[in-house]
Image: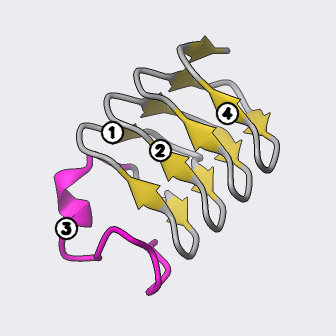
Amino acid sequence: HVNHHSTVEASKLQEFPQHHDTKIGRDVIIEPNVFFGPGVVVEEGAEIRSFSHLEACTVGEGAVVGPFARLRLALRIAPGIGVLGHAT
């Protein structure tokens, strides 16, 4: 579900493939061509850049992921950290 203060409006979130349990916090920026698999949590103020693929992970508050990142396997990105490329 999307928090009502996320940068991506709920009506536009349909443009992003996502699993039913995806949780997106406040003030999150989601660029085009992002895939959300099962078990994804994106905390407040995080940024998910284009062409990223997330599964079973948590993106901490203020973290930046991508572009072209692949996160999976119960990975947690700490608040304020940036990730480029693959992290498994």
Q: Report the mark closest to the observer, 2 or 3.
A: 2
- Residue at x-position 44% and y-position 59%: 29
Say which of 7 and 59 sits in front: 7
The residue where tag 2 is placed is 48
Disc 2 marks which amino acid?
A: Ile
Question: Could you tell me if the residues under marks 2 and 1 are in contact, i.e. CB atoms within 8 Å?
Answer: yes
Task: Give the labeled residue for mark 3.
Answer: 12
- Name the kind of residue labelled 1 in the image: Val
Discs 1/4, front: 4
* Front: mark 2 or 4: 4
Q: Looking at the rendered structure, which numbered label has been put on residue 34?
A: 1
Between 50 and 40, the residue placed more toward the observer is: 50
Q: How far is the residue under mark 2 from the one under mark 1?
A: 7 Å
Where's residue 65, x and y in %? 56, 35
Task: For mark 2, give the secondary structure.
Answer: strand
Q: Distance between the Cα atoms at labels 2 and 4?
A: 10 Å
| Magenta-drawn stretch, dominant element (helix, strand or loop) | loop
- What residue is shown at x 42% (from left), y 27% (from top)? 67
Q: Is residue 3 magenta?
A: yes
Residue hosting label 4: 82
